[in-house]
C-alpha cells in the first residue's frame, strides 16, 4: 500500500510544479504583452518615411519642417556613395510630399542635385535623376533643370543600365527640350532605338514616349526614320506585347506616318538605308499591315482605336479629315487584296 501512495505523492508534486511553471509562463507572457502595448516607438527614426511623416505634420501646423534644407546641407558635406544615394532618395520623397517647402529651394540647390550626375556610382546618378524629376514638377525650376539635358542624354546613351534609362527618360519626358539639345539628340538616336528594342518594358515605354515627341520636330524626323533597327523590329507590334507598350508604339507610328506625308517633309527626296526604321515600317517589304490588322481586334480598346488611327493615317492624305470608311483602299498601303 505504501508504494502506490508514494507514487501518488510524486505525481501530485509533479502536477503542482507543472502548474506553477505554467502559471509563471503565463505571467511572463502577460508582462511581455503589457510591455509591448505600453511601449511607444520613437518620435521619428532616420528612415525616409519617418522623416516625411514628421515634415508633413509640421507643415500641416503651418511650420516649415526644414527637412529639405537639412538634406541639401547634408548633401554638400563629404559623404560616401550610399549616404549620398539615401539623401537624394529622401529629397525626392520630400519634394513630392512638401511642395510648398520644395518651392523655397534655389537654383543653387538645383545645381547641387544636378552635380550628383557626375558621381562615379550609378545608384547616385539614378537617385539624382529621380530628384531632378521631382523638382521639375515645380515650374520655376524647369529652365534650370533643362541645363542638365545634355548630360542626361549622355548618361542614357553611354551607360547600359535599365534603371538609369528609366530615371533619365522620365526626367526628359517631363521637360520641354530646347532646340540647343537637338544636335545631341541626333547623336543619341541609335541608343534610344536600342532601348526601345530591349526587353525592359518600363524603359521601352519611356523611350518610345520621347521618340514620339521628337517625331513631331521637323528637323529630327529624318534622323528618326533613317535610324537603324533590328530586322525583327515589328515584333514590338505583336499582340503578345503589353498593351501599354503597343499603344505607345502605335502613337509613334501614327506621328511618323503623318510627318513623312507632310508637305514640308515631302518637299525633299529622302534616301533611307535598308535597315532603317522607315523601311521596317513603310518600306515595300514591310509587314506593318499584317500587324495593324491583327491589333484591330486586340482585347484592349485603346490599342484597337490607335491601330485604326494608324491605318487611317496610312490610307488618307494628311491634310484631309475623313472617316476611316471614306479612305480609298485601291491605292492605299493595304493593297494586294488586303
Image (cartoon, rainbow, N blue to C red):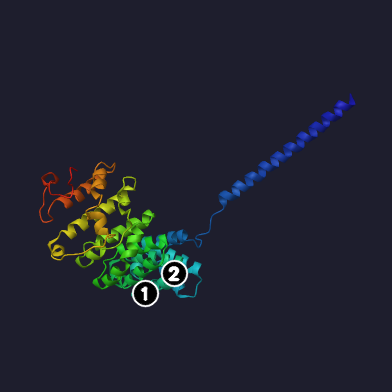
Q: Residue at x 80, y 35 (%)?
A: 13
Dot placed on the residue nearer the N-terminal end, 1 or 2: 2
Q: Residue at x 30, y 58 (%)?
A: 208
Report the side of 315 relative to 99 (left or right).
Answer: left
Report the side of 130 relative to 251 (left or right).
Answer: right
Is residue 63 in view? no
The secondary structure type at the circle numbered 2 is: helix
The secondary structure type at the circle numbered 1 is: helix
- Within 10 Å of disc 2 (Cα), the crowding (few <14, some 14-19, many 20+) is some
Q: Quadrant of residue 20?
A: top right
Question: Is 8 situated above or below 37?
Answer: above
Q: Quadrant of residue 116?
A: bottom left
Q: Are marks 1 and 2 in contact (CB under 8 Å)?
A: no
Q: Residue at x 35, y 60 (%)?
A: 194
Question: Is 32 situated above or below 167?
Answer: above
Question: To which residue does mark 1 refer?
Answer: 111
Please provide percent x and percent y for residue 320.
10, 53
Report the side of 289 relative to 53 (left or right).
Answer: left
Estimate the spatial distance between the alpha carbons at disc 1 and disc 2, rounded to whole Å: 15 Å
Q: Quadrant of the C terminus?
A: top left
Report the side of 203 relative to 82 (left or right).
Answer: left
Q: Quadrant of residue 213?
A: bottom left
Please provide percent x and percent y for residue 272.
23, 63
Question: To which residue does mark 2 refer?
Answer: 71
Amino acid at each position: 500500500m505504501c508504494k502506490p501512495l508514494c507514487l501518488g505523492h510524486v505525481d501530485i508534486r509533479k502536477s503542482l510544479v507543472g502548474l506553477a511553471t505554467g502559471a509563471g509562463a503565463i505571467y511572463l507572457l502577460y508582462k511581455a504583452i503589457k510591455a509591448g502595448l505600453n511601449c511607444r516607438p520613437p518620435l521619428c527614426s532616420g528612415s525616409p518615411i519617418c522623416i516625411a511623416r514628421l515634415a508633413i505634420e509640421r507643415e500641416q501646423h503651418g511650420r516649415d519642417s526644414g527637412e529639405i534644407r537639412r538634406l541639401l546641407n547634408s548633401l554638400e558635406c563629404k559623404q560616401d556613395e550610399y549616404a549620398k544615394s539615401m539623401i537624394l532618395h529622401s529629397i525626392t520623397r520630400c519634394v513630392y510630399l512638401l511642395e510648398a517647402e520644395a518651392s523655397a529651394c534655389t537654383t543653387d540647390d538645383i545645381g547641387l542635385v544636378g552635380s550628383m550626375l557626375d558621381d562615379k556610382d550609378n545608384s547616385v546618378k539614378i537617385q539624382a535623376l529621380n530628384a531632378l524629376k521631382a523638382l521639375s514638377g515645380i515650374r520655376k525650376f524647369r529652365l534650370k533643370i533643362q541645363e542638365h539635358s545634355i548630360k542626361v542624354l549622355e548618361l542614357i546613351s553611354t551607360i547600359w543600365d535599365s534603371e538609369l534609362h528609366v530615371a533619365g527618360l522620365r526626367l526628359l519626358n517631363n521637360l520641354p527640350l530646347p532646340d540647343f539639345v537637338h544636335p545631341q539628340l541626333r547623336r543619341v538616336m541609335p541608343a534610344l532605338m536600342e532601348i526601345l528594342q530591349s526587353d525592359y518594358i518600363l524603359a521601352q515605354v519611356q523611350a518610345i514616349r520621347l521618340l514620339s515627341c521628337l517625331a513631331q520636330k521637323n528637323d529630327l524626323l529624318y534622323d528618326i526614320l533613317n535610324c537603324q533597327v533590328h530586322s525583327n523590329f515589328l515584333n514590338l507590334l505583336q499582340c503578345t506585347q503589353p498593351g501599354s507598350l503597343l499603344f505607345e508604339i502605335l502613337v509613334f507610328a501614327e506621328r511618323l506616318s503623318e510627318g513623312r506625308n507632310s508637305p514640308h517633309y515631302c518637299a525633299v527626296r529622302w534616301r533611307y538605308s535598308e535597315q532603317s526604321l522607315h523601311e521596317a515600317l513603310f518600306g515595300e517589304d514591310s509587314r506593318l499591315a499584317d500587324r495593324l490588322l491583327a491589333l484591330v481586334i486586340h482585347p484592349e480598346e485603346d490599342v484597337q482605336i490607335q491601330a485604326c488611327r494608324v491605318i487611317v493615317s496610312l490610307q488618307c492624305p494628311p491634310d484631309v479629315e475623313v472617316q476611316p470608311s471614306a479612305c480609298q483602299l485601291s491605292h492605299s498601303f493595304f493593297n494586294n487584296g488586303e
